[in-house]
Image (cartoon, coloured by chain):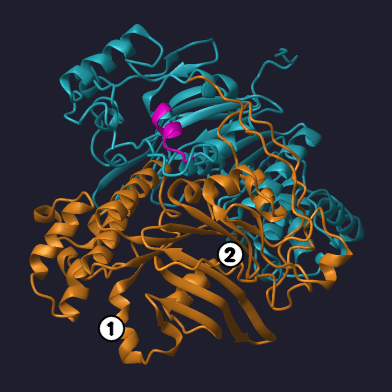
Chain colours: A orange, B cyan
Amino acid sequence: MAGSGTAHLRDSDDVVLRVEDLVVEYKVAGGTVQAVSGISFDVQRGETLGLVGESGCGKSTTGRAVMMLPRPTGGSVRFEGREMTRLSDAELRRTRPRLQMIFQDPVSSLNPRRTIDKIVGEGLSIWKRAGARERVAEVIEAVGLDPDVVASRHPHEFSGGQCQRISIARVLALEPEIVICDEPVSALDVSVQAQILNLLEDMKTRYRLTLLFIAHDLAVVKNISDRIAVMYLGKLCEIGPSDEVYAHPRHHYTEALLEAVPIPDPNASIVPMAVRGEPPSPLSPPSGCRFRTRCPAARDRCVEEEPQLQEVGPGHFAACHFPARVEHGPRVPSVET
Amino acid sequence: MSTTADDVPLLEVTDLATTFHADRGLVRAVDGVSFQVTRGRALAIVGESGSGKSVLARSLMNLLPASADASRGSVRFKGEELRGKPAGQLRGLWGNEISMVFQDPMTSLNPVVRVGRQITEALRFHGGPRGRAARERALQLLLDVGIPDARSRLNVYPHQLSGGMRQRVAIASALACSPSLLIADEPTTALDVTIQRQILDLLQRLQRLHGMAVILITHDLGVAAGRTDEVAVMYAGRIVEKAPTGTLFERMCHPYTEALLASIPRLETPMHTRLATIGGRPPDLIAPRSGCAFAPRCRYAQPRCLTEDPSLVPATGPEHEVACFFPLRTPEGRTALATDAAAGRTATGASAGVTS
């Protein structure tokens, strides 16, 4: 099937989450939005998988489909060996504490009328877990806030960065196995963003978390991820170890994304971007390779035949008939600071 | 750098201040800002949320809400004072001489007016061509900003265009009267990275084509780096450092500039590299200012920073200015850093060395 393939999936006992041929479609006036069209990936225990792409590529939809919010149109989501798509609502509810989510806007994802201890402890009180009070204090402390000071306050008394810390504490309270972070730092200032990224790394180690990290900022994703998956218009273009994908991008879309990132160095050369135009509508995606309408390397074959993910390096897969060969040197001259 | 025959700077801003009356007290959004813009040059104003950069842009254009008080300071455009001028007279400048592009092209375009008419609105207002001639000009502008199938796009409404296309339309309408100054307030923040790249390329091409001066307001030092001649870094309503772009990145002197640059995740660093952070939280603009606003988060902070307010002074070169008592690359700065490191804490009690 479509520009995906499953060659890159791993057979290992350590795989916590395995998504296969995931399809999410929405009916809208005027047709069907093909938000996610048959993508597959897996995440091992303790690993961080970064999911990048531009708006409308289906990365957030993928994150939500993993949570069954809503259930996907097709495909399989296996979490700890259980097929999520076939669970009853009650079983799903019991599974959800193990799968938690952090959202982009920290302020609107916290109930403005509740106090912080209630917000962080809500999951625990729903599940009537013992020792909730101590657990709440522990996780608030873990995210770098003082439980005695913040417990009785309301979200509006905190800055965006602090609200995101509270969201993280709420997630940690339930001792999840996997945390889906949907653009968790996009709404934050650079200086605060760095604090939250460091915090997520610390929490990951301390609580042995597995992360699915969704973001549009390639530098942010690179920093936190072990592996990177690049999405375009509902398809997976490329997946592999972060350092490898960024150093040697083989899909022309990954290459374009990397070239488009503004470099904070006036001496960095701004290479002319080969990719033109804008993504087509997900209501009627192009035939063959979905990226071909913007791709500088597109040929006839790309119109007719959908490329499958194929191995281009150790653990590195790209879905392209004519993968980029250019060995990328460092784009930024190394400056001694 | 040649001196132009005309020595009057295009825009000269002196000691500009804008305050807001909020329930909690007086918000000093812009607190004494001075800078100049030379004809045909690009100035970046860089800052995080709450630094006052957007209020500054709106103060220049006189686009402030009623709760704002913009009494102090001077804004001279081509030698002419704009502050205190009645709106009727300013209208002759807006769109014609000074134009603005905003962050969100959906809200800055009129949703019930077709693209073609939207672009020619300023032309018609300023006595430019009308009717068919105006339409031809609109078409030319759409082609200039790289809108494919431009002739048919003249008849569409903004909601029928993508975000990137809308921003192109907003730029086309800002350029309709060939202004000599374009103020772009976070023009690419709402856009995807490949589209951001296209819009930045476009702005740069048009700037050169029209010999237009640009004030680019952004939170992203990366956006400022490759595209501007000069950078001013704002913090808590003030410019804390100002320099030609190359100088700023190579020889930055303000601890905030250094910290801001260090906290940006880089593509070239290996994964799981621990990021440098700026401790503490952004300043409260309501509390009365005592000393340097950055001191509570600064790893160079000394007792003097808590009581005295630094003003911009020359730094490494004639066009490089910094507002700091203990700037980087000076003996004072090195001593301050060593003192704080030895004490394990700065003068404000923040832990030194480790900045997280």
At label 1, which amino acid type do we have? Arg
Report the front residue among B193 and B109: B193
Q: Position of residue A28 (x, y in %)?
A: 62, 86
| Mark 2 Cα-neighbour bin, 10 Å: few <14, some 14–19, many ≥20 | many
Question: Label 1 is found on which chain of the structure?
Answer: A
Q: Is residue A115 left or right of residue B176?
A: left
Q: Is residue B204 left or right of residue B245?
A: right
Q: Is residue B190 above or below residue B313?
A: below
Q: Which residue is mark 1?
A: A94
Q: Is residue B13 above or below residue A278?
A: above
Q: Which residues are magenta?
A: B258-265
Q: Quadrant of residue A265?
A: top right
Q: Position of residue A174 (x, y in %)?
A: 23, 70
Give the distance between the C-alpha atoms of the residues marked 1 and 2, in whole angstroms. Answer: 30 Å
Residue B14 visible somewhere in the drawing: no
Report the front residue among B352 and B213: B352
Q: Position of residue A177 (x, y in %)?
A: 31, 67
Kindly give the residue lying farthest to the top in the view shown. Answer: B331
Numbered tag placed on residue B216 in the rendering: none
Q: Position of residue A30 (x, y in %)?
A: 70, 86
Which type of secondary structure does the marked residue at label 1 adopt? helix
Report the front residue among B59 and B171: B171
Q: Which residue is mark 2?
A: A8
At label 2, which amino acid type do we have? His
Q: Nearer the viewer, mark 1 or mark 2?
A: 2
Quick one: quadrant of the C terminus of chain B? top left
Residue A276 visible somewhere in the drawing: yes
Residue B233 lies in magenta, yes or no?
A: no
Question: Label 2 is found on which chain of the structure?
Answer: A
